[in-house]
Image: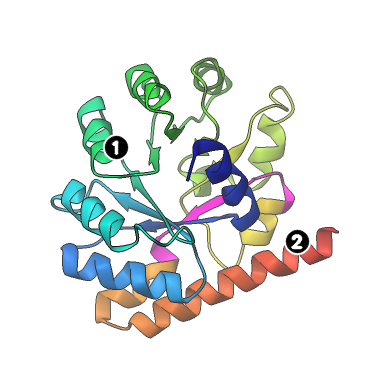
Amino acid sequence: MNKSDLLVKLKDNKIVAVIRGDNEEQVMKIVEAVYRGGIKFMEITFTIPNAEVVIAHLSEKYKNNDDIIIGAGTCLDIVAARMAISSGAKFVVCPHFDKEIMKLCNTYRISCFPGATTVKDMLECLKYGADVIKLFPGDTFGPKAIKSFKGPLPQADFMPTGGVSAANIKEWLANGAISVGTGGSLTKGAATGDYNQVSEEAAKLVGLVKEYVAESN
């Protein structure tokens, strides 16, 4: 899947699952559960031990399935970003802006979603070709912040992460988010081995997005 197609699919699906876990086995089960629930974008965070290996194994497992997109999250430096891309990540997410990570992703035509919380940093993200700006932590600002930031930056696309749940996903989208990143509320069932709960929460979020789209048309 090329970069342009990925961005179109992101805007259509509107949800990125932020996946954290204690080990590869747990992460694999979480990804399977989230995908069963209908979410297609998987952000495998570099807080996971040997995250690049997990990304490589997931990329291999789903290499013939264009319906699921494996990316990398919490890439704090260019080393992590390079490992993610080499392992097959189709997008890279950072909690901050790093021009070297941006240049690396641009070189390999990989979408990068850098984090920013000020107009100054958001402008830097745009200057270096960010396709989507991650507003993190989203719960610190609230959904109305997207509309406020789009006042001076109407050309920017935002993806809030942190505090996004079934209770507020429609509000985030209504205020201008093109997608959301959600993890804690989505995958909490995994802590007790209840992967059916993870699938059910994913399906609930997907259903709410479909409702929002229908109501907006």
Which numbered circle lies on residue 213? Answer: 2
How many numbered badges does the structure rendering display? 2
Residue nearest the viewer, comparing 177 with 81: 81
Which residue is nearer to you in this view: 181 or 149? 181
Tag 2, which secondary structure?
helix
Q: Is residue 165 left or right of residue 52?
A: right
Q: Position of residue 85 (x, y in %)?
A: 29, 37
Q: How is the image coloured?
A: rainbow
- Tell me residue 179's x, y (percent): 59, 49
Residue beneath the point at 38% across and 21% down: 107
Q: Magenta region: which residues?
A: 174-185
Query: In the rendered image, which quarter contains the C terminus?
Result: bottom right
x then y, percent, for residue 5 = 57, 43
Vertical arrangement, residue 113 with respect to residue 65, above or below = above
Rate crowding at label 1 as few (under 14), some (14 to 19) or many (20 or more) other CA atoms within 10 Å: many
In terms of secondary structure, where does tag 1 sit? Answer: helix
What residue would you read off at disc 1?
85
Res. 108 image quadrant = top left
Q: Is 43 in front, or is 66?
A: 66
Residue 72 position by quadrant? top left
Identity of the residue furthest to the right in this view: 217
Check disc 2 and give the amino acid type: Val
Q: Marks 1 and 2, how far apart in space?
A: 32 Å
Q: Name the residue at 72% across, 47% down.
A: 175
Please say if 167 is above or below 152: below
Q: What residue type is labelled 1?
A: Ile
The residue at 14%/53% (across/down) is: 49
